[in-house]
Image (cartoon, rainbow, N blue to C red):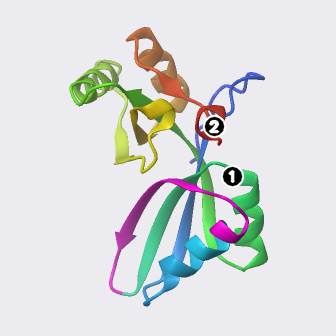
Amino acid sequence: MPTKVLNRPEHRPIIQYSIHADNKVGRLNEIVGLLSAREVHIMALSILDTTDSSIIRIIVDYPEEAHAMLVEHGFSFARSELIAVELTTEAQIKDVTCALVQAEINIHYIYPFIVRPNGKSALAIRLEDNDLAEETLRRHQVKVLTQNDIAR
């Protein structure tokens, strides 16, 4: 069940696309090429591989363009909102996980950004409750990124 993050005018939640792809040579390259042709940049990437298929998780700078490309080319995908946090040091990972465990928020998965928003490291985090997580992280002085923060 997707969770909703509060939509304030300046607050656009981070959008993740989970693309279901056949596990065959060149499939990721095809997706990267199609996004590149639309000048959409992959900001974060994670791949879950099984014997027959893969789930390619991406966060891009322009999710509306990525969505249009995925629909146009007939990809099977899911769109979800998640939390992204900015890290100034590796030690902040502990701050993030401690804040979330204190609030009893379950982490489904985490993966790093490829691009360094604002020149700093960032993590994409899929959680069971984005609203509570965002509030909790901000209370613990962790910078929560928005889609505007990662757009080029």
Mark number, residue 63: 1
On the image, the x and y values in percent for residue 43 come to: 51, 51
From the viewer's perspective, tell me whether residue 61 is left or right of residue 68.
left
Would you call the spot at circle 1 few (<14 residues within 10 Å), some (14-19), or many (20 or more)?
many
Q: Residue at x 22, y 26 (%)?
A: 94
Q: How many marks?
A: 2
Nearest the eye: 119 or 86: 119
Q: Which residue is mark 2?
A: 147
The residue at 55%/26% (across/down) is: 131
Q: Name above or below for residue 73 compared with residue 92.
A: below
Helix or strand or loop: what does disc 1 sit on?
helix
Say which residue appears at 46% left-offset and 21% top-offset: 143
Residue 19, x across and y down, in percent:
55, 69
Query: Reading the chain from its start, which is encountered first: label 2 or label 1?
Result: 1
Tell me, yes or no, whether the two marked residues, 2 and 1, touch with CB atoms within 8 Å.
Answer: yes
Residue 111 seen in render: yes
Q: CA distance from mark 2 to mark 1?
A: 9 Å
In magenta, the rendered stretch is 36-51
Q: Is residue 48 magenta?
A: yes
Determine if the magenta segment contains residue 98. no
Closer to us: 50 or 30:
30
